Amino acid sequence: MTQKVRLHVRKLFDGQAYHSDQVLVIEGRNIIAMDQDTSQVDTVLNGLVAPGFVDLQVNGGGGVLFNAQPNVASLKIIFAAHAKFGTTGLMPTVITDDIITMEKAADAVAEGISQNLPGILGIHFEGPHISTRKKGAHSQQYIRPITDREWALFKRKDLGKIIVTLAPEMVPDEQIKALVSLGVKVCIGHSNADAVTTNKALESGASGFTHLFNAMSPISAREPGVTGVALTSEVARCGLIVDGHHVDDLNIRLALKAKPTGGIFLVTDAMPPVGTDAKEFEFFDRHVTVKDGRLISTTGELAGAAIDMASSVRYCHFKLGICLDESIRLASQYPKDYLSGSPVKSGSTVQLAPGMLANFIQLDEQLVVQSTWVNGNKVFSTETMANEV
């Protein structure tokens, strides 16, 4: 029989409101009850307990690049690295590569899901059906149209959620419709499309934009480009890298003002250095160096990011002045809403309550993660703020 655990939470943000001195009763994967009887508890959690972060674009972490080592062992290392920073669910991301790598990555995710690995929500294929003009750090030799072997991947039902980032000028509207009919979340990214082409892709079912402002046609006076459509769409959500390098602070504020509440969510686009002290790594036929927090490829491009989700939330709150509630929702509720298909204007919702998965984090006053809980299990803890009683 599954044991019940009673956690005394000094301060709880449930995703919508704050509460003091709540006892979360956890059994198995779920929160089964909440009360205020603090006389008999197993653990006291000081600081702030909040919903766990969900990251829909994770290329690597813990010294591992998923493309380079597409196996279950890598998934365990990558998730453990990100769990230190409050991520309770992530989408392992395969960037533009050969079909064999994509197939191995899919098999690894399927195996991980079958083993109930914590935190693995599905898989994000970022390419290879993208624009050579907006490829960024992606390898041009692997960029291609969708082939039968990719369709076989996209049709699989053992991969959890599937996100495909593509350039609509490279993928016909009929194929976008077919992807959406399979349950795939189609995001527009690494695209040099004009506004007409981008809007047609949205009409065909594309529902998101990958790392807004980066690797997409910009706004000009007479051509809104992908960026203009992304900012003005009332229904499509946009992932945003908030690390002080990928997007200027003013553009972050612009995006948050332009989009409906919930229309922006944080992503890390994380690479192997996250969770390590590494200052360089190999990336396909290139070398990437960490310089002042920027990942610079030998060919000059930004090559992903070295930021974690907790640092992104801190940047939003302390640097940009976004209220704490919304900073947390940008990293928790809004990416979950996108993945589940909830409408943009759903507003803030309760994420931690009886009947819900026990996926939450414990933060100190500086929003540094002290412990991370996934499906009722503590997967990371500094032990500095959890006092056993």
Image: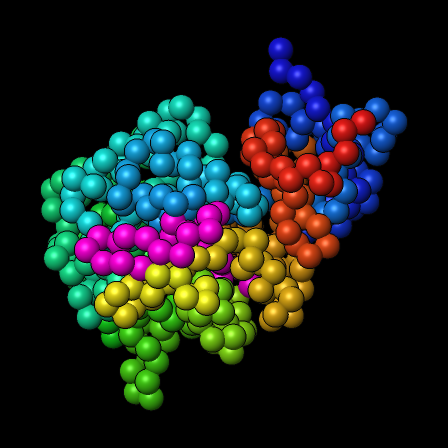
Q: Hey, which quadrant is residue 111 in on the image?
A: top left
Query: In this rendering, does residue 151 appear at all?
Result: no
Relative horizontal placement of residue 210, taking residue 127 as reference (left or right)? right
Image quadrant occupied by the C terminus: top right
When asked about the image quadrant of residue 212, the answer is bottom left
**Residue 275 included in the magenta stretch of the image:** yes
Residue extending furthest toward the bottom = 221
The total of numbered circles placed on residues is 0
The percent position of residue 299, horizontal first and vertical second, equals 23, 67
**Residue that appears at 12% across and 57% down:** 141
Q: Taken as a whole, is the magenta stretch helix, strand or loop? A: loop
Residue name at image x 65 percent, y 66 percent: 318
- The correct choice, above or below, for 328 with respect to 190 in the image is above
Q: Which residues are magenta?
A: 261-288
Q: Residue furthest right?
A: 39
x and y, in percent, of residue 336 in the image: 50, 47
